Image: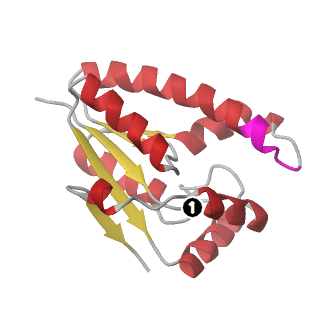
Amino acid sequence: MTATLHVIVGPCGAGKTTYAHAFARREKAAAFILDDWMARLFGPDMPEPLEYAWMLERVGRCEAQIWSAAAAVLATGTSVILDIGLMRKADRDRVREIAEATELPLQWHVVDAPQEVRRARVAGRNVVRGESFAIEVPPDMFDFIEGVYEPPAPDELAGAVISLSD
């Protein structure tokens, strides 16, 4: 059995984490959700207001640990699902390069929804704090993330699984 690296991308509030959890249950794969790691490891220490440099440093640490754990899981023949942000094309290119260098099958999953739907989901998630809640995303953080996100280019979408919700 060949393990596959499944990578989920999409903007804030698109449903990436919900998709990752459902996909992991259905496919018997291990899901690694960056927001969960950030909340557990650094949530209690998070400064108010959130500082971008503080966050980026910790995201880097979490990603390094996630990659280490994911590599161990993949080595057992179990597929892995990564929901680790990858908001910029350069971030996605780095994942693609890692997969190619290690000859690891890679499947992209793009999850998206209209901005007004995503904004409402995030606001609701902040209140309900259900399965997909890890870190509160206030409106200013949502707007910031919107400015960072680079939608996948057409060449990145070749062969991707696309999930659009409303």
**Residue 5 appears at what percent x and percent y?**
29, 37
Q: Is residue 157 above or below residue 163?
A: above
Q: Give whichever of 163, 52 is nearer the camera.
A: 52
Q: Is residue 52 magenta?
A: yes
Looking at the rendered structure, the secondary structure element under dot 1 is loop
**Residue 4 appears at what percent x and percent y?**
23, 36
Query: What's drawn in magenta, residue-wise?
Result: 49-55
Q: Quadrant of residue 137?
A: bottom right
For disc 1, the neighbor class at 10 Å (few under 14, some 14 to 19, many from 20) is many
**Residue 80 appears at what percent x and percent y?**
32, 36
Picture residue at 61% right of the left edge, 30% below the top: 60
Picture residue at 68% right of the left edge, 71% below the top: 123
Residue of label 1: 12
Q: Quadrant of residue 36?
A: top right
Q: Is residue 140 visible?
A: yes
Residue 91 relative to residue 130: left or right? left
Q: Which image quarter holds the N terminus?
A: top left
Check disc 1 and give the amino acid type.
Cys
Q: Is residue 49 above or below residue 130?
A: above
Picture residue at 72% right of the left edge, 56% below the top: 136
Residue 80 relative to residue 146: left or right? left
Q: Is residue 11 magenta?
A: no
Q: Which image quarter holds the C terminus?
A: bottom left
